[in-house]
Amino acid sequence: MKKSFLAAGVAAILSLAATQTQAQVSLGLKGGANVSNLNGLSVNNFETNATVGFHIGGYAAFNLGRNFAIQPELMYSTQGAKLENSTSSENLKLNYFNVPVMAKFITNSGFYFEAGPQVGFRTGDVSINSNREELKSGDFSVAGGLGFIGKKQGFGLGARYNVGVSKIGDANSTAIQNADYKNGVLQISLYMRLFGGGKLKK
């Protein structure tokens, strides 16, 4: 499953790169805060609440028209949930390398709406109450958002929500009661364009 996710992500990026001779390309950095939870998670005697993390990485925007662009990204993202009961609190931390590919509809003033798929690859071990948990290494999400990026200055601000489509749990878990939970992540990002022009292709 992990290999199929990786192959799909690489194929999408390569197909977009093949169009760069016909599109204006810009490269940049982005990063910001995550507010994440694990929707559907059930753990003995614990309530599941949102936790705060971060994301950081880079993007390439292929402007295919004056008001349309395709933007693949490579992001490192800290996600998960906070598990709490009457006596203790514990963070369930999940770290991913995510590859979203967003279709962006951009107004002449610089405001945009975006939507697209995202594949993720989990890194590191996961534990609850010192017990190592077996979670799936791959994740598939659908994302949507809005924001603003200056055409001349190259700085921007965006908000995006990633809705988990694939289940990330494992039926053999020792502490988690079900394997049907999924990622849900709200991201607030700052953009900085490094290379490429600000004006969209006419």
Image: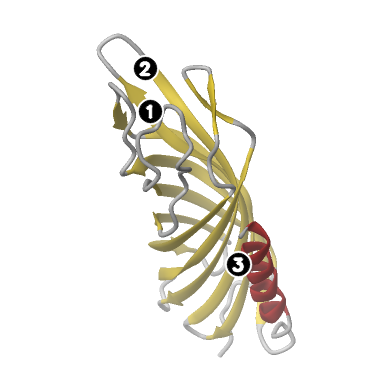
Marks 2,1: beta carbons within 8 A:
yes
Query: Residues under labels 2 and 1: Cα distance?
Result: 7 Å
Residue 36: percent from the left, percent from the top? 40, 41
| Label 3 to label 1: alpha-carbon separation | 30 Å
Check disc 3 and give the amino acid type.
Pro
Label at residue 139 = none
* Quadrant placement of the N terminus: bottom right
Q: Residue at x 44, y 75 (%)?
A: 106
**Badge 3 or badge 1: first in the primary sequence:** 3
For discs 3 and 1, the disc positioned in front in the rendered view: 1
Could you classify mark 1 by the number of other residues whose Cα lies within 10 Å: few (under 14), some (14-19), or many (20 or more)?
some
Q: Which of these two is toward me, 92 or 161?
A: 92
Instruction: Name the spot of residue 199 as percent of width and height, x first.
Output: 58, 77
Q: Secondary structure at mark 2?
A: strand
Residue at the spot of label 1:
82
Taking the spot 37% from the left edge, 46% from the top edge, the residue there is: 181
Q: Nearer the viewer, mark 2 or mark 3?
A: 2
Q: Is residue 19 above or below residue 60?
A: below
Q: Mark 2: which amino acid?
A: Ser
Task: Tell which circle, 2 or 1, labels the residue nearer the N-terminal end.
Answer: 1
Quarter holding residue 176: top left
Mark 2 and mark 3 residues within 8 Å of each other at the beta carbon: no
Task: Kindly identify the amino acid type of the residue bearing the numbered disc 1.
Answer: Lys
**Under tag 3, what secondary structure?**
strand
Q: Quadrant of residue 5?
A: bottom right
Query: Where does label 2 land, which residue?
Result: 89
Q: Circle 3 sits on which residue? A: 72
